[in-house]
Image (cartoon, rainbow, N blue to C red):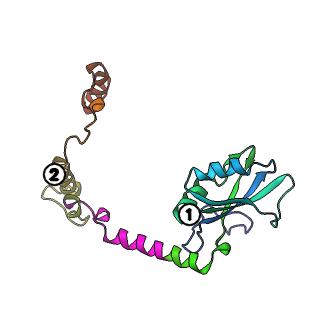
Amino acid sequence: MPRDRDEPAAVRVYTVCDESKYLVVRNVPALGCGDELGSVFAAYGPLEECKPMDAEDCEEYTDVYFIKFAQVSNARFAKRKLDESVFLGNRLQVSYAPQFESLLDTKEKLEVRRNEVLRRIRSPAGSRPEGLSQYSPGQGSSSGNPHHHMNSNKREYMKTMPATHIEDDRFSHVPSNKVCSISKTMFLLKN
């Protein structure tokens, strides 16, 4: 069934060019609450500017604010968390404003994104552990169970992991009365 054009998309994808360290916040109550709005957004990173936009059309009793973050990543996080959130009784509408970027801002944004992608490609964190990467779905084992090989590799991988990496004394000892309920549950699950 074709989608209604007026219906908003369930998922919105932003490209690097769509994202910006400049945000426009609509539906802010017209109560002179710019400082409070700035402090809410500043929780997601350092702000360079937070000021009302007089030239923007807005509904009665609401204001539109212009917010500039120091970094695109901070603006991205703030937009994701604060878009459609309630501020002083009104649901905020946060959108990127790449139209306010200068040529230098755009170059910087693209260079940061390029370095970020290169770092992800070069980092070994994206690769799979040795024991798990040897299994392929086409392989089987002599027992005929295709999952046997994967499970044995997983066990070997888990054996090589350290038993604990917590050095905090609060977590090194658990009283026996706290372990009791967990061990009963584990016993029931095993049987």
Residue 63 vs 186, above or below: the answer is: below
Q: Position of residue 40 (x, y in %)?
A: 63, 48
Left or right position of 75 against 123: right
Q: Position of residue 135 (x, y in %)?
A: 22, 62
Q: Please report the residue visible at 47 percent of the width from the left and 76 percent of the height from the top.
A: 111
Residue placed farthest to the right in the image? 60
In depth, the one of 79 and 70 nearer the eye is 70
- Return the residue nearer the eye: 4 or 53: 53
In the depicted structure, whether residue 65 falls above or below residue 1: above
Residue neighbourhood size for the residue with mark 1, other residues' Cα within 10 Å, grouped as few (<14), some (14–19), many (≥20): some
> Residue, x 12% and y 58% (percent of image)?
142
Quadrant of the image occupied by residue 147: bottom left
Asked whether residue 129 is drawn in magenta, I would say yes
In the rendered structure, the answer to whether residue 36 lies left or right of residue 106 reads right
Q: From the viewer's perspective, is the residue at label 2 or at label 1 nearer?
A: 1
**Element under label 1?**
loop
Q: Which mark is residue 70?
A: 1
Three-letter code for the amino acid on which mark 1 is drawn: Ala
Please tell me the numbered disc located at residue 163: none
Q: Secondary structure at mark 2?
A: helix
Which residues fall within the magenta stretch? 111-130
